[in-house]
Image (tube, grey):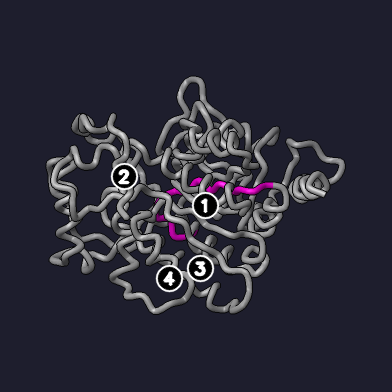
Amino acid sequence: MKILSLVLLFAGFICAGSSAQDAKPADATRAIIQAFDTHSLVMFGEVHANKQEYEFLRALVSSPQLADRVDDIVVEYGNSLYQKAVDRYIAGEDVPIEEVQKAWRNTMALGAVSPVYPSLYEAVRQVNRQRPGKHQIRILLGDPYINWDNVKSREDVGPYLAHRDEFYASVVKDEVLAKHRSALLIEGWPHFARPPAGPGYIEKELRAAGATTFAIVFGTNAVGGYDDLDKRFDAWKLPALMLLKGTWVGGLPAMPVLSGGTAAAGPNPVTLQDVADALLYLGPRDTLTAVNMPRADLEGTPYGREIARRFEILLGQSPNIGPAPTETPQFPPGSGGAPPPLPPPPKSIHDPLPPRPN
């Protein structure tokens, strides 16, 4: 039965009698749901804070067909210290928002969290409330259990920073695979990218634990320099999911597509088919927007002061909380320059994770 489902999935992408190079994209929602017929885990490598991406994900999790098939959604923007509060919130209980928002505000990601992440929590909560007595989706928090209230120096952060991928994989193994469940995994695409584009640690660990994985990355129509946009994408009906192995899309250099043309392919470019199994495409590069936390939620607020404190601890400087629109281009020109130099990692980065608090 699984072999038949896999054939049907591929048939949805490639028309009968055509070669892989002539492959056409499939409806992304339907294709991702079908992928769970043959895979225990669908791994989605996201671009952080993207509006169109999270509009798609909210619609996806709201699909009854997905809710019937998927047990868990494992997120990067979720501190596992707050799993119990999130479980209650996702189940539809009345949980003070100040309690549950700690899950997405207190991860290892530096800076103010984009509103796209709490919007996914809310979407899953609404789905579960609309399905009383039916199968419920659980959100699993994949970031280590750091308590920022106890962080006073960079050395306090090192072990949590060093073991993010290891911890994320352990959550999936313990809470999904060991319980014979299925899950949608969501994390920044570099965490999921296969070597040599990424470490490949998480997928390797999950496959060793018996998982069958299907890896998706979110990409653009930039295929070279910033102004090198491929017109072949214009004919695609959105939202589109395209298989990569052996297709013209899979042969594209990965970095321009994934970075919106802000990062060069390099002399020996890694192709998209080296990175993942499929590409999610939601529109031309210049239509994609990032959603930022409103300045009013940061300037002069306890959360804004806490973000500034974390910057001071980790980087020795305060963040620039200046005037900025809530939505900005996801890949503006010139955004791919070299990042400012970072201080050396804390010595504690080689230490094991501390015991999990009770």
Residue 157: % across, % down:
23, 42
Residue 56: % across, % down:
54, 61
Q: Is residue 293 left or right of residue 215?
A: left
Residue 43 is inside the magenta segment: yes
Are the residues at dot 1 and dot 2 in contact (C-beta closer than 8 Å)?
no
Give SS at disc 4. helix
- CA–CA distance between discs 4 and 1? 17 Å
- CA–CA distance between discs 3 and 1? 18 Å
Give SS at disc 1. helix
- The residue closer to the viewer here, 348 or 110, is 348
**Which amino acid is tagged 4?**
Arg
Q: Identify the residue at horizontal 67%, vertical 53% (top origin).
A: 36
N-terminal-most mark, 4 or 1: 4
Residue 112: % across, % down:
27, 56
Q: Identify the residue at horizontal 74%, vertical 47% (top origin).
A: 13
Can you tell which mark lies on residue 175?
Answer: 1
- The residue closer to the viewer here, 315 or 94, is 94
Give SS at disc 2. loop
Q: Identify the residue at horizontal 56%, vertical 53% (top origin).
A: 184
Are the residues at dot 4 and dot 3 in contact (C-beta closer than 8 Å)?
no
N-terminal-most mark, 4 or 2: 4
N-terminal-most mark, 1 or 2: 1
- CA–CA distance between discs 4 and 3? 12 Å
Q: Which residue is mark 2?
A: 355
**Which amino acid is tagged 2?**
Pro
Can you tell which mark lies on residue 11?
Answer: none
Q: Which residue is mark 3?
A: 124
